[in-house]
Image (cartoon, helix red, strand yellow):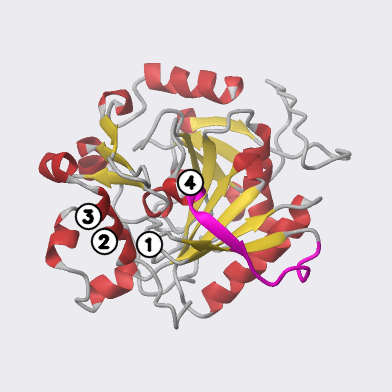
Amino acid sequence: DRILISAWEDRFAGGLFRYDVTAVSTKVIDGKKKYVAQFNIGRATNKRPTEFSVDKVCQDFDANKFNFTKADLKEVLFSFTKLAGEADENVSRSVFEPSAAVGESPTVVLINVSPIEYGHVLLCPRVTDMLPQQISPENLLPALYMAAESRNPYFRVGYNSLGAYATINHLHFQAYYLMEAFPIERANTVEIFPGTHGDCTVYRVNGYPVRCLCFEVGDSFEELASLVGGCAVKLQGANIPFNILIADHGARVFLIPQVFSIRIANNKIPEHVIHTGVNPAVFEISGHLLYKQESDYDQCTETSAEELLACASLTEEQF
């Protein structure tokens, strides 16, 4: 955390961000769920536009469009790798080497120039391999390891598929510090298929407006990555957009299929919901809602937040 924050603040002081994220307005919405609302006009007006169609979850990498090999090198904070031969992969043992040699295709951490919160970074596995924005068990592992490296319980890692508000088709995860519990983390869970997934436990999340699953690690991040990554591969094959939230230092992973953009395309989202401008990417769909208009931010309620999120959920039959 110290290394990440120090490097992030250095880039902040250097003026590399498109706006001052420390100046945005944030509040906890009254109610049992404790949704977190933010008014962030900078992200609404300065975020990079999407350069691909949103109707296909799996699309080929296109080197002609923006990707992270085109980012300013000043935005790169450090490369990240799991220590070779680490005895217990669920226990962090960080080593920072300021002048370490970098391999041919490093996994790098760089700033998000349109940040949502303090310390907002991007994790780009094997960045020069130019992998498309698709999940596999193998490429989920770096995100789990990164979550485990943080000692701060408020550090979470997220993923957006194409069609679920990823804006760049180059494999990456998002991460930042939110000093509140995400409402999805507070939701009740019920174990499903007990004893069928090795040391990992699978839960259905109940009482949350978006139907989703929660996976809990047993003894191995590799086993967790295999399970969650395998489910993600099936969603990709079925062309179902989804988000992933990694919480509790990698111990819990939420897999959240969603159809918000599909329903917009089919004119099935109420106009007043669309008018808020809230796009339910991973952190929004987990309960951190980014409003683009101050009036919507001022007037938001738990009821309106749940109505918006419910628009993203699969039906019970689809789920």
The label on residue 304 is: 3
Image vertical order of residue 138 relative to residue 19, above or below: below
What x and y, as percent, mark residue 240? 46, 74
Image vertical order of residue 233 relative to residue 121, above or below: below
Q: Residue at left 62%, top 50%? A: 252
| Mark 4: amino acid | Phe
Q: Residue at left 45%, top 81%? A: 318
Side of 246 relative to 272 (left or right): right
Q: Residue at left 50%, top 64%? A: 212
**Residue at the left extreme of this rendering:** 295
Q: Judge whether residue 179 can be spotted in this image.
A: yes
How packed mark 2 is, by other alpha carbons closer than 10 Å (few <14, some 14-19, many 20 or more), is: some
Q: Which residue carries the number 4 mark?
A: 68
| Mark 2: amino acid | Glu
**Residue at the bottom extreme of this rendering:** 317
The nearer-to-camera label among 4 and 2 is: 2
Picture quadrant where residue 96 is located: top right
Q: Which residue carries the number 1 mark?
A: 209
How packed mark 3 is, by other alpha carbons closer than 10 Å (few <14, some 14-19, many 20 or more), is: some
The nearer-to-camera label among 1 and 4 is: 1
The label on residue 194 is: none
The nearer-to-camera label among 3 and 4 is: 3
SS class, disc 3: helix
Residue segment shown in magenta = 185-198
| Mark 3: amino acid | Ser
SS class, disc 4: helix
Q: Which residue carries the number 2 mark?
A: 307
Instruction: Give the mark, 4 or 2, whose residue is nearer the N terminus.
Output: 4
Placement of the N terminus among the 4 image quadrants: top right
